[in-house]
Image (cartoon, helix red, strand yellow):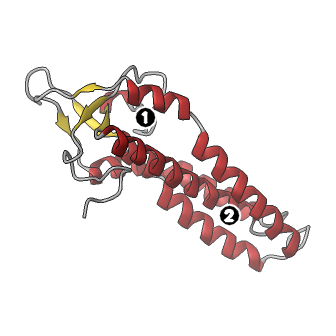
Amino acid sequence: MARGGQGLARVAVVVRAGAAPLWWFGVFAAGVGVLVPGLTGRRIGVMAGAVLFIVTAAVVAYWHRKRYAALVRSAARAGKHDVLQDRAVTVRNWRRGHRWWLVLAWVAALGSSFALPAAGGMMLAGAGVGLWLKAGWLGRREHAEQALIWVRVDWLGRRAGAPAGKPVKACRATGVSAGDAAPGGARRR
């Protein structure tokens, strides 16, 4: 990096990075879980799973919203020597840092099917949907502010996945054309 510069990762990309793996692991676990009759039966398991899906999606989508809003409001302009991390690198770092947690969550969702068929998988999928909703909310904030929000890579933590964690003291902002991701963290078209 150039003098005084630091690596910056998009906040919305970090939030969105776990959505697809959680969704697909959850859908697969729910699909396999439906095949197992379980202790409660399929009907009760799927009904409980639907409730867990909705509740988990809502909780994940609204978790730390005040913290994110405060960071967005206080974002300072990024310097010309700051290095913007590519979307693919941010997603890869998040997924590498969380791969064992994802596998453990998937195994737990599959195992829970013996008690409540499909419920654990639907809850996992709900977490993925909640992350998509949160990234969409951040994208709308970025669009309204006409600024993309970035966080220092070294503040993201060991697993590269805490854009609103305690180490994050402030965010940086750039124009909406910076980087290779659109507002909300999706690929730029």
Q: Amino acid at mark 2?
A: Gly
Image point (24%, 45%), residue name: 176
Image point (48%, 47%), residue name: 137
Q: Please determine whether, in this image, residue 29 is positioned above or below residue 120.
A: below
Image point (65%, 59%), residue name: 107
Q: Please determine whether, in this image, residue 111 is positioned above or below residue 95.
A: below
Task: Measure the alpha-carbon separation of dots 2 and 1.
Answer: 26 Å
| Residue positioned most to the bottom | 35
Q: Is residue 5 left or right of residue 61?
A: left
Secondary structure beneath label 2: helix
Quadrant where the image shows the C terminus: bottom left
Image point (23%, 48%), residue name: 86
Quadrant hosting residue 159? top left
Q: Is residue 49 left or right of residue 170?
A: right
Quadrant where the image shows the N terminus: top left
Residue 134 % position (x, y): 51, 47
- Dot placed on the residue nearer the N-terminal end, 2 or 1: 2
Q: Which residue is mark 1?
A: 163
From the viewer's perspective, is the residue at label 2 or at label 1 nearer? 1
